[in-house]
Image (spheres, rainbow, N blue to C red):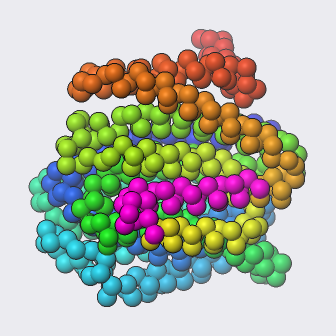
Amino acid sequence: MVKESRTNNVIKNTSITIICHIIFLISSFICRTIFSKKLGTEYLGIGGLFSNILTILSFAELGLGSSLVYRLYKPFAEEDYNKINLYLKLYKKIYNIIIFVILLLGVSIIPFLKYLVDAPNVKESLILLYLLYLVQTATTYLFVYKKTLLTANQKDYIVTLFNETSNVIMNILQCFILIFFKNFILYLLIMIICGIVNNVACSIYVDKKYKFLNNKIEGKLRKKEIDGLKQDTKGLVMTKVASTAFSGTDNIFISSVIGIKYVGILSNYTLLLTTINTMMNKIFSSITASIGNLAVSNQSNNKTENVLFKMFFVNTTLYTYICLGLIFLIREFVTNIWLNKDYYLSSSIIFLAIFELYLRSIHYPLYTTRNALGLFSQKRKIFVFAAILNIVLDFLLVKPLGITGLILATIICRSITYFTDIYIVYKYGLEKSSNNYYKMIAKWFLFASICYFICYLILRKIVLTNILIFVIKILVITAIYGILFFIFFRKAEDMKYFRGIFKNKIFRKKEKV
């Protein structure tokens, strides 16, 4: 019964996440198209730069979300509602402090903005625009502690419904503002208001769904439980440092050394990559609670590893195909179909950016498993080293290599954290050798490399560019990928497993008919 419930939750969380995010992707794409045509690259650059700065400020959150959700798995499994209320009381205090710290740190950066950005074609006050971005970042933490209940209870799809509905409405309103008023300040105000309404609405839903939140709280958390949360947080701080260094500094270096215009040019490519990445990240976030439930149910390490392998198979199957297509098609799409030649990027930048996305993507199943198992504090100094190394390499490589150097720095340092996570999960979580995992990675890299070189040899002969040729290229890539995938994985155990699930679904539908 538990197994069936867990599987159903995974399917529901994943399917709803995909559907909602595709809808959001379409609305976001339309909104970005209008934004690019109405306001231009410098406004795009401003948005990218301020978002990067505030990503660094969100370091104040310390990655607590993962730890808080993990601490709720066991109380939910045991239906210990008083313990859940005790944790939520603590979480509320923590997040209120986080909002205050983000606002305080954000305001302290204002005197340094003039050294980070030069945007002569932006007519609005840069300080005002920055403050609006700051408020938007801080308000994302309003009532967010209640969302952890849904995630820990394997109902993350509900959070997704609230988030994506809010985002779609926001994009529609922003399109209206851009078309009829061309006003960046109103554009940002809509972003703030929709974010607040989303969190408040989700909070009201949680209050109605979980009636035990109105129960009188008895006692307090034990010292052991608080110490455990502190220990998790110490580990997560290090991980957060690395994550912030990887994703929160590139645009700052580009703006201050190369120019704000190039932040805007790069942002349209990174928008497409980030959107895909976010959708997959949401899918695996929705699975995390189910793995955590599996762990607290005292299931074997072999079973947990089996789930990890299945997640890796699905994740890497999708990402290899997506990244393969992006390498060959993203620049053509941006410059010839979506926007224009002003947004041209070199092949080396595109290849490295997508390779970094691929490296990040194959990390997700492992990272998700690590969080679900509560492995937050092991080898945390390595993550700090990777973060410092990333900033040092950014500084050393940005002038001689430009954007290429920044991406190379991220790839090097992200590789360090990836292999560290492999060691942590297998050493402290699964307590077994990681040889099978490394063999799996090697096979996928060999497969991806062969797909790339065959696609390259064929597609370089197609020199014409139009929508029809673009579609033909998609079909060619799909055919090559499909044939090679069948050759490589037709006998794989994970392939047999998912083929069996697919057949069962088909037969059940026929029986019902």
Tell me if residue 286 can be seen.
no
- Asked if the magenta segment contains residue 405, the reply would be yes
The quadrant in which residue 210 appears is bottom right
Question: As rendered, which of 309 and 488 lies closer to the eye?
Answer: 488
Q: Give the residue drawn at x 75%, y 38%.
A: 439
Q: Could you tell me what secondary structure mostly forms the magenta stretch? A: helix
Question: Would residue 328 be found to the left or right of residue 258 on screen?
Answer: right
Question: As rendered, which of 200 and 178 lies closer to the eye?
Answer: 178
The quadrant in which residue 69 appears is bottom right
Considering every residue shown, the one lying at the far left of the view is 180
| Residue 430 vertical position relative to residue 467 in the rendered view, above or below | below
x, y percent for residue 111: 31, 88
Question: As rendered, which of 72 and 403 lies closer to the eye?
Answer: 403
Q: Give the residue drawn at x 31%, y 77%.
A: 116
Question: Would residue 216 be found to the left or right of residue 223 on screen?
Answer: left
| Residue 260 vertical position relative to residue 469 in the rendered view, above or below | below
Quadrant for the C terminus, please.
top right
| Residue 330 vertical position relative to residue 37 in the rendered view, above or below | above
Q: Give the residue drawn at x 50%, y 61%.
A: 409
Quadrant for the N terminus, please.
top right
x, y percent for residue 177: 18, 58
Q: Give the residue drawn at x 39%, y 46%.
A: 348
Question: Would residue 211 be found to the left or right of residue 18 on screen?
Answer: right
x, y percent for residue 81: 74, 65
| Residue 147 vertical position relative to residue 161 in the rendered view, above or below | below
x, y percent for residue 479: 48, 18
Range shown magenta = 396-423
Tell me if residue 389 can be seen.
yes
- Asked if the magenta segment contains residue 27, the reply would be no
